[in-house]
Image (cartoon, grey):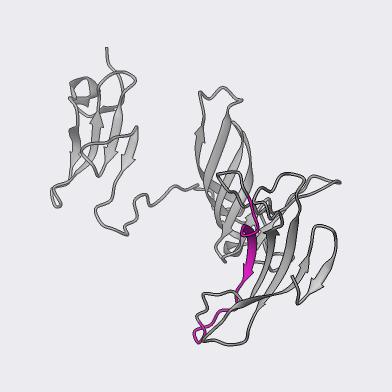
Amino acid sequence: KKYGIFFPAISCTSITSFTPIVHCTTCHYNTLVIQHDAETCGKIGIGTASPGYSLEVKGTTGDSTILQKIWNTDTSWATEALVRAYSDSANGSSPAVDWGYFRGTNGNAQAGFIIKTGSYGATTTKLIVRCDGHVGIGTTTPGTETGAKLEVVRDNGEGQNTILALKGHDPDGDIGLNNTVDLDFFLWDTNTNNTTPQGRIGLVGNDPTGSQHLESGGNLAFYTSVECYTTLALCERMRIDPFGKVGINTT
């Protein structure tokens, strides 16, 4: 009984474990190896004589291009060249992930890397990294309207729409006054090389007992840095406490 693919004068039935199929005479590496243990245990190695996965491709140098071309031969705009992975057999309903290259409708400026998720055969784009450096989550045209380098869109109609959630977690379950969740802002140039942000918005724990339960509030604090390159430091300028009181230059 024969399994697998057939090469001229070579079949998988005559292959023992890790028998090289194609050998490079100049670099002396096995460029294609097929391991045939059983009907369901075949492994293919390209650039390696000991593949550990169903398909393993390995380069010979540090920053080499391992897989050069996965492409769609269609030369029109808005075409995709994708690789698909799904969780089980292709039965038409299993979750699937596609990733690969997208050539945008407006030319190379909107081309880039995309990730699509969904059910098998019906995936939609969830993330795109365009060739011009714009990144979109929930949109395929990041920066087109806003000019932002990172654009996150959640389109679910009316109601509460949480776009970005920042969460600080303490594994022992005790969140106290020293626990914060911060969003930092940097103005960077070659003269300053700042490691301290010039601005910060942070959520600061409020419960002095060190056990911040669901009913315990937090303080929303605003910081700016002092204007000194050598001793840059953040100072809290304003705080909104759990009771709605606002303090400026006082905590």
Work out whether 46 lies above or below 2: below
Q: Residue furthest front?
A: 209
Horizontal arrangement in the rendering, residue 46 relative to residue 195 (left or right): left
Residue 3: in sight, yes or no? yes
Instruction: Give the residue at x 17% y 25%.
Output: 16
| Secondary structure that dominates the magenta span | loop
Work out whether 39 lies above or below 237: above
Instruction: Give the residue at x 51% y 23%.
Output: 89
Horizontal arrangement in the rendering, residue 109 relative to residue 48 (left or right): right
Instruction: Give the residue at x 68% y 50%.
Output: 138
Q: Position of residue 8 (x, y in %)?
A: 22, 29
Q: Position of residue 229 (x, y in %)?
A: 54, 86
Q: Nearer the viewer, residue 124 or 2?
A: 124
Q: Nearer the viewer, residue 216 or 42?
A: 216
Q: Residue furthest top?
A: 1
- For the record, the magenta segment spans 175-192
Q: Quadrant of the C terminus?
A: bottom right
